[in-house]
Amino acid sequence: MSIQYEEEQNIFHLKAGGMSYAMQVVRGKYLAHLYWGRGIRSYEGSRSLIQKERVLEANPESGDKSFSLGTLPQEYPQYGNGDFRSCAFCVRDEAGSRISSLSYQGYKIEKGKPGLPGLPASFGKEPEAETLRIHLRDEAAGLDVFLLYSVFEKENVIARSVCFENRSQKELMLEKMMSMSLDIRESDFDVLTLYGAHNNERNPDRRPLKSGTIQIESLRGVSSPQQSPFMALLRKGTKEDQGEVFAANFVYSGNFQALAQADSFGNTRFQMGMNPWNGEWLLEPGESFWTPEVLLVYSDKGLNGMSHTFHRFIRNHLIRSPYGKQERPILINSWEAAYFDFTEEKLLALAGKAKEAGIELFVLDDGWFGKRNDESCSLGDWYENREKLPLGLHSLEQKIHSMGMQFGLWVEPEMISEDSDLYRAHPDYVLHTEGRPYTYGRRQLVLDLSRQEVCNYVLDAMEKVLSLAGIDYIKWDMNRHLTDVGSAFLPSKRQGEVFHRYVLGLYWILERLTANHPEVLFESCSSGGGRFDAGMLYYMPQTWCSDNTDPVCRIGIQYATSLIYPPVAMGAHVSASPSHQTGRISPLSTRGNVAMSANFGYELDLTKCTEGELLEISEQVRFYKEIRNTVQKGAFYRLENPFEGNTAAWEFVSEDGREVLAFRFTVLCRPNAPVEILKLQGLDEEARYQNAKTGEIYGGDELMYSGISIPPEEGDYRSGCFRFWRV
Ligand code: GLA
């Protein structure tokens, strides 16, 4: 049994994989957090909740000065009666009060993992998962709150979400509804988050939690490259391969907030959920509201341990597409090869060279529709540009297919250009606030997906695109953030819902489109990796990792992205040198090694490559086909951290443990440098491994503990791949 309830002490003990999570109903009313950490056979409460009188703390019971909600470690803390820390939820009643008092009502244990209405969510059947539903009630407000904990039997994962139900006869305004909150009875942590920007996504930020709050958020309407919806608490000294990690990742693509708050008595409040700012939701009598879910992951094997759990879990319990389990094709994308400037002839010439190199999928990026020759127009006009493609998309697609390649297309369906037929017909489709001027991003406006009518239009438009030609792949882009957020179709008291309704509208479209076309491979994109989150991965099994394809920058971006997401989820392309983003000149081999470490493709004008380069590209493609299974399905180990030095290294071990691939990168060449060592991980100590190139055979223990010598090489941005077979 994964969920145990011990009646005498009212303790819930959730056992997931190798971890335990324990809670207790205190005084018949309050849900306290007891423990989250390494697995315990039977949780009996040796570390009891000792409360003591503390001056300036408030007491819910007049006769007991030792008991205070302000010092009690809790699971879903409320506002207004003595807990002065960040509350997990806040409800305003019709009289304007924000005070809540929940009391425990009971629990239910269900087999499997339920879905969440209208939201992406992890899945697992019995016996893979079991779900605990704890019922709390605020009698005065007439509010029921259900806390859901889905425990995965074989993974160190608990998925948490919350459902609010208005059982009163009056309206309730949900002002804050975190998906998860818990108070760890310790505070000596480092907090790890990922921050960035366009072309510079996901940089790790590790800072000590001392006092007060470390908080990250997005208010951009999307999860954003500025902060990823991820936070981890690291025990001091935790490294890649050792130490304890308590991580939370949000399965949601809109505004979010995550925080770690140290109180004065050695507890850390850890919270994640939708951003409460301009994020209210009106709950009419009888209505319910579901929060998106948070994945809680525990590791006692350092950050690599955390990542292994995330990677496996995302592949097996989150990505719904049939491609989640299939090998992904090697693609060529037309964007950096031609930008907006192409003809059918030019595209076919590019496809021809790609085919010769062994590339499997041709993707026509931006510029194929409306009268689009630059960013200024046509978003919304999803029919082919007959000036550029006089024979139409269908003709192009047929020619590509007859070459023996798959055909893919770029779209940006959430957007509208002022200069478009769509805007001329439906200016009201724009997300905006009446009486206020528009704010632009990339000269474009956003469609108001909080309206069903607009969602119907988008779904319909995309169905038409998919019927224009035989399309095997869609790149779904989103190139600006939300401004002027408001809706003329909602009453004033529902204006705070627009941000979330936008995301729900997007999910409504994606749910239908991806279910109608399971044969299509979808890749999500938002000016590169600007919406790289678990919510999007639920619908689309891969995400364009960054517009920045400079290999040196990509090493860092992919390294940090791998903290949460498996390499197969990261689109990675070899592009031209000098790089279009940085101007850096780098060897083709290194561009290849970086891109090959993820979901591989090309994005450069192959018709301008030299014979030598084309030969090298064919060789890279051939090699990737050989290693693809291991890269896309194997276990991934980060070996050397590019954020800490001049080198980076990572390694893949195939599912069956037979193949080992280590990639190592040196950024700048150092004169008269020492011989460096690379130590492998994840091998069988007792097994022997043969170097695929040299034929030399070594023990797994030697390769891991003594390592391989890396001879110094001349030149900047060098890299190598070491391949071993277990013999
Ligand atoms: C965004 C994407 C790019 C490309 C362009 C096209 O920037 O991230 O990959 O598709 O849009 O306009």
Image: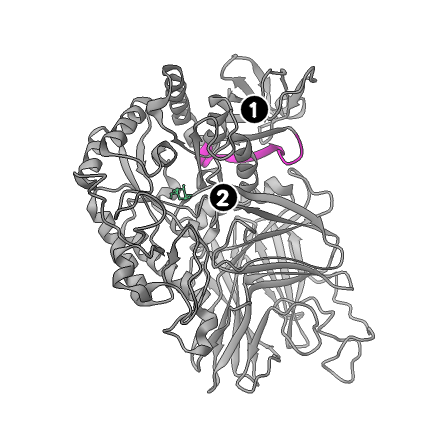
User: Can you say whether 197 is above or below 707 in the image?
Assistant: below
**Which residue is at a point 46% across and 31% down the rendered structure image?**
595
**Which residue is at a point 78% across and 68% down the rendered structure image?**
50
Q: Nearer the viewer, residue 664 or 39?
A: 664
Residue to which mark 2 is pinned: 312
Place of residue 697 in the rendered image (x, y in percent of width and height, measured from the top left)? 56, 15
Q: Quadrant of residue 75?
A: bottom right
Q: Nearer the viewer, residue 48 or 33?
A: 33
Identify residue type, mark 2. Arg
Q: Nearer the viewer, residue 167 or 599?
A: 599
- Dot 2 lies on which element? helix
User: Can you say whether 455 is above or below 555 in the image?
Assistant: below
Q: Which residues are magenta?
A: 631-645
User: Can you say whether 627 is above or below 697 in the image?
Assistant: below
Q: Which mark is residue 717?
A: 1
Q: Nearer the viewer, residue 86 or 149?
A: 86
Q: Earlier in the sequence, mark 2 or mark 1?
A: 2
Q: Is residue 115 visible?
A: no
